[in-house]
Each structure stands twice: as structure tokens, then as C-alpha cells.
């Protein structure tokens, strides 16, 4: 099942759609908290603060979108309110762990430098993914005539990707090599996560 078909199936089932939105909200919130956790209290930049704030807003916005699916109320991120709850909660954490492991081996980074480099690469990989995922999801929403809309998130995520590329270019002349590695790590985790979402949906259907 391709992403478009998966999203079309989800969008046409209110219970699944609400849990999908809640899952995306969880992941945006996790990303925002990870950005904040990587901040250095003295040297945190405007771009990092802006990015964390916008990711928190995305989490809130997605949560609010659930209200447009009138029959569904999902007050928290409890497992029964999510899709593939275990993998959804573990996805970003595992990406962070794997990228940190790569940076230690490839660049021998530690401490503050490791945290900042991991922020750059993890966030870049996530923005590449968001740049693919949200437009496909929006297409499914539009075709279904859904009241739910993620166009504002798409615009901001495009801006985030540009900002991450600019920061990575300042970080290393070899930034593309490291960024490609982060994307490869993320791709494996994403495919595993999507498989779990599909399996849960097929069980529920």
C-alpha cells in the first residue's frame, strides 16, 4: 500500500483519521521537545527558538484538527488514542540515538558539539520526510473533501528545510555526506513505522 492509498484509507475512516492526527501531533510535539532539549542556554539562536515554537504550534494545530472529526475525542497521547503507539513514540528517539552514534564514530563529537550536530542532522532528516509526507496527506484530504487541512504546516515545513540546509552548510563542507546518512537512517525507521501503522489498520478494518 503506497502512502497515498494509506492516507486515503485513513481519511475515509473517522476513528482512524482522528488517531492519525493525534499521532502526527505526538510526533511534532516530540520533535519540538527534542529541539528544546538540544538548546545551549547561552548560545541558542533565533532560528532554533523559532523552529521549536513552530513545531509546538504544529502539534497543537493537528490536535485542534481532530475537532473537525466531530465524533472523535482524543484528549491525550495515551496508546489507545494513537496509531502504532509504541513505534510512533520510539521513532524520533531511535533516530536521535542512531544519528548520535554515527556522529561519534564519523566525527568523534561529544558533549555540546554532539548535541548541536545531532539537532542539525535529525531535524534535517525529519524536514525532508515532512516535505514528502504532508503534501501527499493533503492530497488525500482534498480528494475526500475533508474539513481537515494541513496546508499551513506544509508551507512552514518547506521553510524549515531551507533553514536546516543553511545551518548545515555552515556546520561542515561535507554536510551533504552527513545529511545523506541521517536521511538513510530515518528512511529505515520510517518504513518500519509505516509498516506498523498499516498492520494496525488492517487489524482494525
Image (tube, rainbow, N blue to C red):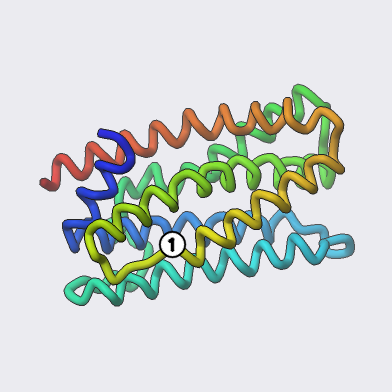
Mark 1 burial class by Cα count in 10 Å: few <14, some 14-19, many 20+: many
Q: Say which element carries label 1.
A: helix
Task: Give residue 6's quadrant in the image.
Answer: top left
x, y percentage for residue 95? 57, 38
Image quadrant for the N terminus?
top left
**Residue 182 position (above or below residue 165):** above
Look at mark 1 in the image and give the residue it sits on: 25
x, y percentage for residue 185? 56, 29
Residue located 48% across and 44% down the image: 132
Residue located 71% across and 48% down the image: 164
**Residue 85 position (above or below residue 95):** below
Residue located 60% across and 60% down the image: 33
Residue located 50% across and 67% down the image: 152
| Count of all numbered marks drawn on residues in the image | 1
Name the residue at the top extreme.
105
x, y percentage for residue 160? 65, 55
Q: Is residue 104 left or right of residue 80?
A: right
Q: Is residue 108 left or right of residue 74?
A: right
Q: Is residue 200 left or right of residue 118?
A: left
x, y percentage for residue 183? 59, 32
**Residue 103 position (above or below residue 5):** above
Amino acid at each position: 500500500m503506497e502512502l497515498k492509498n494509506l492516507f486515503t484509507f485513513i481519511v475515509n475512516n473517522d476513528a482512524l483519521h482522528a488517531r492519525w492526527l493525534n499521532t502526527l501531533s505526538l510526533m511534532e510535539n516530540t520533535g519540538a521537545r527534542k529541539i528544546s532539549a538540544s538548546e545551549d542556554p547561552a548560545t541558542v539562536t533565533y532560528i532554533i527558538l523559532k523552529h521549536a515554537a513552530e513545531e509546538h504550534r504544529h502539534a497543537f494545530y493537528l490536535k485542534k484538527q481532530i475537532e473537525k472529526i466531530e465524533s472523535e475525542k482524543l484528549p491525550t497521547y495515551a496508546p489507545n488514542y494513537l496509531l502504532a503507539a509504541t513505534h510512533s513514540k520510539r521513532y524520533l528517539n531511535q533516530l536521535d540515538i542512531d544519528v548520535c552514534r554515527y556522529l561519534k564514530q564519523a566525527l568523534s563529537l561529544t558533549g555540546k558539539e554532539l548535541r548541536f550536530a545531532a539537532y542539525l542532522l535529525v531535524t534535517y532528516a525529519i524536514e525532508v520526510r515532512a516535505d514528502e509526507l504532508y503534501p501527499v496527506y493533503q492530497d488525500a484530504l482534498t480528494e475526500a473533501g475533508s474539513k481537515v487541512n494541513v496546508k499551513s504546516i506544509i508551507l512552514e515545513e518547506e521553510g524549515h528545510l531551507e533553514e536546516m540546509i543553511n545551518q548545515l552548510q555552515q556546520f561542515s563542507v561535507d554536510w551533504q555526506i552527513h545529511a545523506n546518512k541521517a536521511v538513510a537512517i530515518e528512511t529505515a525507521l520510517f518504513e518500519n513505522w509505516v509498516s506498523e501503522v498499516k498492520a494496525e489498520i488492517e487489524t482494525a478494518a
